[in-house]
Image: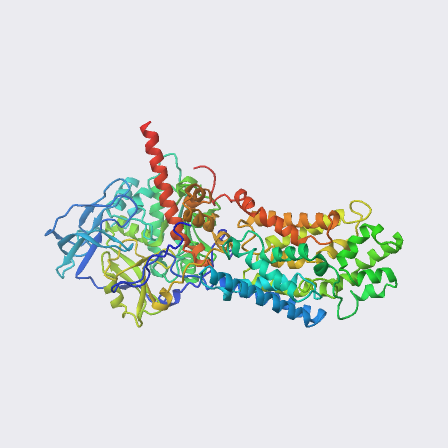
Amino acid sequence: MGLKTFPGGVHSDDFKRFSKDSPIENFPIPSKVIIPLSQHIGAPAKPVVKIGDEVKTGQLICEPGGFVSISMHSSITGKVTKIGRFPHPSGNMQQAIEITGNGKDEWVDLIDEPDFLSLSVDELKSRISSAGICGMGGAGFPTHVKLSPPPDKKIDVVIINGVECEPYLTADYRLMIEQGENVISGLKTFMKIVGAKTGYIGIEANKPDAIANFKKLLKDEKDISVVGLQLKYPQGAEKQLIYACTKRKVPNRGGLPMDVGVVVQNVGTTIATYEAVRYNKPLIERVISVTGKIVNHPRNLKARIGSSFDELLEYCGGANEHIGKVISGGPMMGFAIPTLNTPMAKTSSGLVIFNDKDAKKDEEHICIRCSSCIDVCPMNVMPSMIANSVKYEDWEGARKAGAMDCIKCGCCAYVCPANIKLIQWIDIGKNKITEIDRARREKNNEK
Amino acid sequence: MKNEKFNPPEQSVAGLFAVSASPHIRENRSVRKIMWNVVIALMPALIAAVYFFGIRALTLTLYSVIAAVLTEAVIQKLRKKEITVLDGSAVITGILVAFNLHSGAPWWIPVVGSVFAISIGKHVFGGIGNNPLNPALLGRVFLVASWPTLTTAGWKTNTLGSISGIISNLDIPAVTKLVSTATPLAVLRELRYPAVLAGLDKSTLQSFAGEIVSLGSIQNLFLGNIGGCIGEVSAIALLIGAFWLAIKNVIEWRIPVSYVVTVFILTYIFGGTDGIFSASIMLPIFHIFSGGLILGAFFMATDMVTSPLTKAGRIYFGIGCGLLTTVIRLVGGYPEGVSYSILLMNLVVPLIDKFTIPKAFGGGKR
């Protein structure tokens, strides 16, 4: 089988051995959940409950705060006890709703519609939208928005991102081998909604059993095929995955997959979509890998959104060494969070625990211009040059070196022998350039 | 520099865990590892030098390294900076300064060269990472300009005989006399100006040129059994080192390959004495393995700090070095052009980088 891939990237130990053989387990329903209003890209959701309200599992507690936004649902049965600022899985403090459970798990009414694929496109989309689904790989783009391209953008390919290229994480892998049929049903739903004739499931070569599972399930499917991909980070980055599967290149400077007729969806998102269109089930739980060298029993847990990382880790037996760093998401693009007393969100694909040794960071050395960062950059930009421009506050220089095309995959900083925090520098540049552009636009509008 | 130290607090504060920007894992690489790998890669050439030129090759190299390291330490002490001599970069400069001298040079020549290389070539610009020119080459050029006779004349011949087996077999007294004090490249260049060699007729010279560019002499060039600088003579030893650097991901093919290929093509076209394409195929091979080309192409042109960042830029850089080397060797006043050509190309690196920023990965307009 010829494995496909993209130019650039890095080879890293995938560290998946800790949790990959642990089947998905249900994490007990927590006695309290904290549901952040912003778990996605776009406007934060607007609460429709107030303190003291009784809520059922799956009940709407927030409606979308804008077009690019999603709704939120209570993930347990109980009472709204607080609306305020709580630690957020991206490492800071954000608005969230606290719900204290009453020990019961009473769901809103669900349906079962095995023939969901015969529903109209509008009905399917509205079910996805009202289930509050966003991309569950990490970025959290609202799924119903992704499935509603403007009429001039014809979509002909849907790709399911089964790459899970972040080291340590195994949640998607477990879903693919345990719930392969549901992934296919979800993919068919997407294909129907956008009118695509072709479906791909892209999987990296380090998950041969997932590839084999889909090959078996897809024996009689003409339109859907599995694409085996080389083991290389960031194979699961959207643009890189699209290129590997279709040889299409998403335009740079803000181009989107739909510009080349492609929609990409993460495995978790696909299963959530299947559950939404078939059962009308809102997104209130997801699979998260709780893993790391020092975790006593690394596991893949199906846990309610808003469960605390602390309890998840405890359920996995805690850590057998002093904890140095806690990462929400994967180690390449995830967030280091200051406290375990943080809730998991719809985008929380992993909880990775490092000991002090792995958390230790060396000082930044001066750049020796080795150009490793440039050689590995999958976006073909110039990380060291951007960082240098940012240090000198030469924002135009940073722009020319490609700051705005950076996908923040972290390959550059991963290989940098001088330990330069390239992503951080590039991020400063990106933010500043965005600011400059906004100011410039506003000025032009005034004229 | 503004924001020079941008190190947000990473240590746990009041029971909180360390936070930092992603990524949270890193490849096991460091500047120090890269530099010491280069030092390791230069060892085969040093061993070859000791084999061919005797222990003096080693002592000169040691003088040079000690001078380089001490200079760096003193300057960093004076500037109240962290002393980083253990990162290996000064050691490399020291070795390379010595490698660019012949083994008959007096002991203070490499010392002066290294002091100059580290102080003027490196620390004047702010130290590692900031120097626009290859310090070791700058040191060599400084020495050649200041003490031309001590650095270029009186090449120590091989311990294994005269310049090479085949040359000693040539029973031409004048030529033997000449070659015993010159490098093969110097001999070759003299042949292009026959008037310099009074008393030799043209046919003798041409047959000598044929001999020098013969297979036997190429073999000697490859092994290093010739006159020349300490570190440049043994192509095979240098290539073993370069292979080590390539597998350690320290050097990359673009600069050395484009450099060597350019020299090969240009000397093949223009190297002959009877117009273009008059050279035998052995001549470009001779050019590649003689003088400092292998040392230059694999160890000096590839110096990270002074070579282009972009992939395309590295190709242009290598071609530029090759072009200048060939021009200097074939029509310039010096027999050898590697050091000047790399230094000249070092100067245009910022320009090359500026004009070769690649297009970001992606299709056309959205």
| Quarter of image, res A157 | top left
User: Coloring scheme of the render?
Assistant: rainbow
- The spot of residue A189 in percent (x, y) is 33, 47
| Residue A219 in sight here | no
Q: Where A434 sits versus B193, above or below?
A: above
Q: Residue at x 50, y 67 (%)?
A: B86
Give the residue furthest to the top.
Answer: A447
| Quarter of image, res A208 | bottom left
Q: Is residue B241 left or right of residue A433?
A: right
In the picture, which quadrant includes the C terminus of chain A?
Answer: top left
| Quarter of image, res B105 | bottom right
Relative depth, front residue between A240 and B359: B359
- The spot of residue B262 in percent (x, y) is 67, 49
Q: Is residue A343 left or right of residue B278?
A: left
| Residue B192 in sight here | yes
Number of on-image labels: 0
Q: Where A353 sits versus B192, above or below?
A: below
Q: Is residue B186 left or right of residue A332?
A: right
Relative depth, front residue between A348 and A171: A348
- The spot of residue A244 in percent (x, y) is 47, 50
Relative depth, front residue between A223 and A333: A333
Relative depth, front residue between B262 and B52: B52
- The spot of residue A347 in percent (x, y) is 30, 53
